[in-house]
Structure formats: C-alpha cells, structure tokens
Image (cartoon, coloured by chain):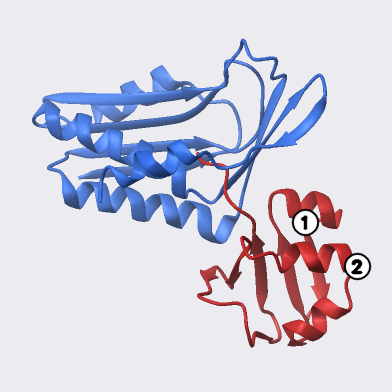
Chain colours: A blue, B red
Amino acid sequence: MVLDVRLVPGAFDPAGELAAFTARVPAAGGVVSFLGKVRADSGVEALEIRHYEPMTLPGFAALAQTAARRWALEGLLLLHRVGEMGPDAPIVLVAAAARHRRDAFAATDFVMDHLKSESWLWKRERTAQGWRWIEPRAQDHSDRARWS
Amino acid sequence: MDRGARLVFLGRLEDLAGMAELAVPTGPLEQVLAGLDRELAVALLDDRVRLALNGRLLAESGGIMLGAGDELAFLPPVSGG
C-alpha cells in the first residue's frame, strides 16, 4: 500500500507526479485522479494558501489513511500546494489506485470532499481590488455530508 | 523570551495581528490576551476561531494556562483545500 502525502511549497508537475505514482502500484488495475487548479477566467491574479505546519500535513495523512481503510486501494497520492500561485497553477492532485475502478473513483471523490471542508488551509485571492480572504462555502459542507 | 510561550495567528488573523506569531509571557490566557491590542483580542476570541495547543485542537477555550515553550494557535474558519 503506497501512501504519498505531501505539502508542496513550489510549482509541481501533475503529469510527472501521476506517472511516478502509477509506476509504484503495479497491482492496480486503474488509477483515478483529480487535479484542482486556479481558475484563469475569474479576474484572480494570484492565490495564496497558508497552512499550519503542526496540523495541516498530519490532517492530510489521517484523511489518506481513512480512505485507505474504507476502500480496497493499492495506493493513494495526495499533493497540495501551499504559498502563492498564479492563474492555471495546479493546486491539488489526488489519485487513488485500486485493482478495480469503483474503489479508485470513490476514494478520490471522498478525499476531495473532505479536503474541501476540513483541511487546515487558509486561502486568499488577489484581484484588481486587492487581496480578499476566501470564506468556507456551504456546498463544501454538504458535499462532505454525503459520506456520513 | 525562550522560556515564554508563543501565540500563532493563522489566515486573516495573521494580517490583523500584523505578524505570524508573537512571543508572550507564560500564564493564564486571559491575562496574555489582556496585554494585546483590543481589536486583535476581540478577533481571537470570536466563537468561530478554534484553538490548538502544541498542534492539538482544544475542545474549549476556557481555562487555558500557557507554560514555557507552549505554542497556542488561533485557527479561523478554513477556506477549503
């Protein structure tokens, strides 16, 4: 079982990361991935994500382990950017590898729903009007409630 | 000051405080907060702000005593990953 969970302080290459992860899970019959990126059409010039070292990564690791217990996985990859990034930059890459695709789809969806509502991350974005902190969305909480 | 404690401000609280962390004397949290800028102290005590002592989330914010080397983090609502 491969669990690869990292906070990434600089730009990363999603295709390269996915290829490297896939190479580590030979028993998998499928790999499902989700890539979250900064929207490039919304007037956002920069996005900054701040984290809290003692809690953010341990929280991600616990989430990955929960998913690994709940579904039959060969591996789970969870990469999350922190720091400042521009339009189109990759923010988050989640990939689940499993012998059978449904486990991989479900685990990826589960991890994303929990990341959106529970991560110890704070985001702000810069538009022509300046920096603005991003508030939690009600939708993020109802998405997570699908799993309980 | 290395025998004191440390407050850590996350998200918008960092901007409000004008710093990411602050070295403070040890003692009851109420006493430490009383020494801060009033606007900042009010923001730190907001119901939606969670507290973590040395990386562990606290169930409630009452009766906190800061000891030497303690790190108390103020966590405003998260924005999502």
- Residue A11 as seen in the image, left or right of residue A19: right
The answer to which of B53 and B61 lies nearer the viewer is B61
The answer to which of A33 and A10 lies nearer the viewer is A33
Check disc 1 and report the residue beneath it: B20
Task: Tell me the element at label 1.
Answer: loop
Mark 1, chain letter? B
Can you say which quadrant of the picture contains the N terminus of chain A?
top left
Mark 2, chain letter? B
Check disc 2 and report the residue beneath it: B37
Residue at coordinates 12% horizontally, 42% vertically from top-left?
A72
Query: In the image, what residue type sits under mark 2?
Result: Asp
B53 in relation to B66, above or below: above
Query: In the image, what residue type sits under mark 1?
Result: Ala
Residue A24: x percent and y percent? Answer: 24, 32
Between the residue at mark 2 and the residue at mark 1, the CA separation in whole angstroms equals 15 Å
* Residue A15 seen in the current view: yes
